[in-house]
Image (cartoon, helix red, strand yellow):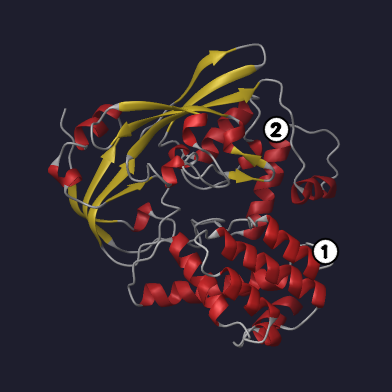
């Protein structure tokens, strides 16, 4: 067997932002054997590497001087069944939403709340995808991955993956060390519907749903997503990649003391959206390489720089800014949301930049 590595390939159709860039090397992998052959080739060993599935978690700002590996591993198989459960194996190149639809069509429950998440099956365990009250780890059974050094296949069970909130061992110790080739999910033959997420239950109530089914829940989730985000085929985007804040006890006590209630605030979310668009424009315009995660970090740091120096929010930011966990920045933005909401103060007090007019205009539309 011999795989063909192409050179100077345009990547526009391989990323959801449809950025018009090229890569020095490009290879499509359709079998495990091809991947095991690839890891010993000089183009692989001596190059920076990017694995592309659906292309929804990457933002190119310049040509890539390395190897892009397009994951085309396909297949969905039932490997075991019992009266209550089915163990479903999906190859990592399968589109995630297609797997969700497959499970719904066969009346296997567990991932219907994760409908319409962009990307492939292989990316799902990397960040422990989750939405509308459900996380992957709740149905995850195991995965297989190929070691980039040895080419050997290793099995990872649930405990091996160290799943956390949008996190796993593949984002930490094993980052860029393994290629996930397949994932096994343990799904329910007698579904237990989860509509605990308020936005989802509100949507179902609005639709006057009397009897739940997997498809009804999936359709409701899809509807909510389409209301929030444009179709990436029409307008380039990466779906939703914002995370809920994670705060420690000390931060939580501070939040409770300074706010009457902890509720989401649309105004600050809009500020963050506007700032993201501005950063995206600047970085792309100047061809500065940056990942979506780093872009968001820069955005939050910039928010801290622009706070009114006399505001409570600035003082809280300065207190936590040197901590290493990025979650504190998210906790900080959550503090801004709750403080802004409870005190009903204007953006001109919190911020030293002119966004209030744009926000007011959008609010009044």
Tell me if residue 264 can be seen.
no
Q: Which mark is residue 261?
A: 1
Spot occupied by residue 81 in the image (x, y as percentages of width and height): 57, 13
Query: Dot 2: few (<14), some (14–19), or many (≥20) neighbours within 10 Å?
Result: many
Spot occupied by residue 300 in the image (x, y as percentages of width and height): 54, 70
| Left or right: residue 57 compared with residue 138 | left
**Eyeballing the image, is 239 above or below 305?**
above
Query: Dot 1: few (<14), some (14–19), or many (≥20) neighbours within 10 Å?
Result: few
Q: Earlier in the sequence, mark 1 or mark 2?
A: 2
| Left or right: residue 221 compared with residue 38 | right
Quarter of the C terminus within the rendering? bottom right
**Eyeballing the image, is 258 above or below 49?**
below
Of all residues shown, which one is farthest toward the top? Answer: 83
Badge 1 marks a residue whose secondary structure is loop
Of all residues shown, which one is farthest toward the left? Answer: 42
Spot occupied by residue 172 in the image (x, y as percentages of width and height): 42, 46
Q: Nearer the viewer, residue 30 or 196?
A: 196
Indicate the quadrant where residue 358 lies. Answer: bottom right
Q: CA distance from mark 1 to mark 2?
A: 34 Å
Q: For the residues carrying marks 1 and 2, which lies nearer the camera in this image? A: 1
- Residue at the (20%, 44%) spot, across then down: 44
- Residue at the (15%, 32%) spot, across then down: 2
For the image, the number of numbered tags is: 2
**Eyeballing the image, is 43 above or below 255?**
above
Indicate the quadrant where residue 35 lies. Answer: top left
Q: Which residue is mark 2?
A: 214
- Residue at the (61%, 25%) spot, across then down: 187
- Residue at the (50%, 45%) spot, across then down: 127
Q: Nearer the viewer, residue 134 or 234?
A: 134
Quarter of the N terminus within the rendering? top left
Q: Nearer the viewer, residue 160 or 294?
A: 160
């Amino acid at each position: 067997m011999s795989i063909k590595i192409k050179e100077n390939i345009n990547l526009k159709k391989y990323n959801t932002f449809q950025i018009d860039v090229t890569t020095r090397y490009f290879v499509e992998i359709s079998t495990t054997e091809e991947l095991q052959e690839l890891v010993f080739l000089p183009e692989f060993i001596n190059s920076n590497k990017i694995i592309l599935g659906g292309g929804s978690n990457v933002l190119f700002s310049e040509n890539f001087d390395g190897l892009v590996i397009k994951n085309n591993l396909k297949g969905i198989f039932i490997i075991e069944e019992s009266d209550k459960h089915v163990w479903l194996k999906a190859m990592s190149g399968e589109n995630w939403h297609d797997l969700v639809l497959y499970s719904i069509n066969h009346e296997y429950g567990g991932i219907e709340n994760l409908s319409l998440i962009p990307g492939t099956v292989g990316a799902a365990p990397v960040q422990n995808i989750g939405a509308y009250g459900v996380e992957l780890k709740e149905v995850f059974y195991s995965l297989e991955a190929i070691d980039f050094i040895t080419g050997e296949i290793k099995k990872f069970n649930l405990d091996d993956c160290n799943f956390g909130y949008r996190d796993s061992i593949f984002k930490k110790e094993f980052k860029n060390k393994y290629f996930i080739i397949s994932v096994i999910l343990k799904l329910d033959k007698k579904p237990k519907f989860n509509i605990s997420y308020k936005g989802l239950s509100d949507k179902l109530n609005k639709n006057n749903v009397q009897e739940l089914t997997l498809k009804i829940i999936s359709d409701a989730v899809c509807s909510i997503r389409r209301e929030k985000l444009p179709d990436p085929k029409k307008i380039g985007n990466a779906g939703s990649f914002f995370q809920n804040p994670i705060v420690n006890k000390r931060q939580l006590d501070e939040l409770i003391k300074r706010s009457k209630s902890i509720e989401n605030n649309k105004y600050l979310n809009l500020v963050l959206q506007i700032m993201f668009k501005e950063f995206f424009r600047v970085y792309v315009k100047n061809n500065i390489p940056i990942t979506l995660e780093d872009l968001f970090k820069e955005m939050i740091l910039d928010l801290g720089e622009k706070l009114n120096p006399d505001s409570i929010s600035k003082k809280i930011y300065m207190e936590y800014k040197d901590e290493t966990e990025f979650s504190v920045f998210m906790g900080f933005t959550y503090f801004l949301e709750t403080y802004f909401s409870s005190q009903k103060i204007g953006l001109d007090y919190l911020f030293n930049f002119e966004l209030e007019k744009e926000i007011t205009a959008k609010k009044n539309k």
